[in-house]
Image: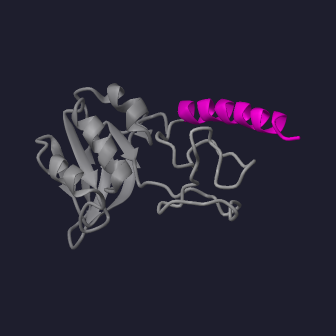
Amino acid sequence: FGKGVASCATCDAPLYKNKTVAVVGAGNSAMDAICALSKVAKQVFVLNIADDYNGEQLVIDKINSIANVKTYNQTKVVKISGQDNVEAVTIQRHGKPDEDLAVNGVFIEIGYEPSISFADLVEKNEKNEIKVDGNLQTSVPGIFCAGDVNDAWGEQIIIAAGEGAKAAMAVSNYLTNQK
């Protein structure tokens, strides 16, 4: 990481203007990255271990129409290599010999599942994210949730930090009003 391997296209896409990049994954997180990178990169290779994209069809159709995006399905990443920075990614395609793709960056976008096993008391959505209201309070009064594990929009550290401050203020207000 930091030498051409990244996990946040929102943050790092501008660093790859007119360069060739690979996106590992083909779910919703990867598709967001592909759309962002395709606007700045010369070429975007999508490396997908599955048979096809796994996300919203509207976004899949959009990606399939982008000229500088090439998708490799049934493809496993074997190695990322380079001297001081990423120079290539070695892929293994179903039934074919290993192949090196020259790239300047690799974005690991295999998605994530929130780790919220501790939160059995609160209501969650279909993605296993904790449901919160506008004050970041969960379905249980007095329990608040900030950051990427909640269902509020945006998975960025700066958003999580802001939510943490907002949740702290909401907790203070909640406790002040308890008598």
Position of 168 relative to 131 (above/below):
above
Residue at the (30%, 48%) spot, across then down: 31
85 or 138, which lies in front?
Answer: 138
Q: Position of residue 169 (x, y in %)?
A: 72, 30
Q: Is residue 163 magenta?
A: yes
Q: Quadrant of the C terminus?
A: top right
Quarter of the image for residue 8 reads top left
Q: From the viewer's perspective, is 49 left or right of 148?
A: left
- Region rendered in magenta: 157-179
Q: Position of residue 21 (x, y in %)?
A: 28, 40
> Which residue is outermost to the front?
179
Quarter of the image for residue 84 reads top left
Q: Position of residue 143 (x, y in %)?
A: 72, 49
- Which SS type dominates the magenta stretch? helix
35 or 80, which lies in front?
Answer: 35
Position of 3 relative to 14 (above/below):
below
129 or 50, which lies in front?
Answer: 129
Position of 36 relative to 62 (above/below):
above
> Which residue is outermost to the right?
179
Residue at the (23%, 66%) spot, across then down: 97
Q: From the viewer's perspective, is 116 left or right of 57?
A: right
> Which residue is outermost to the bottom?
95
Q: From the viewer's perspective, is 75 left or right of 136?
A: left
Quarter of the image for residue 111 reads bottom left
Q: Position of residue 41 (x, y in %)?
A: 23, 32
- Numbered label tally: 0
Q: From the viewer's perspective, is 163 left or right of 10?
A: right
Image coloring type: one colour
Position of 154 relative to 93 (above/below):
above
Residue at the (33%, 42%) spot, across then down: 33
Q: Is residue 85 magenta?
A: no
Residue at the (47%, 41%) spot, across then down: 153
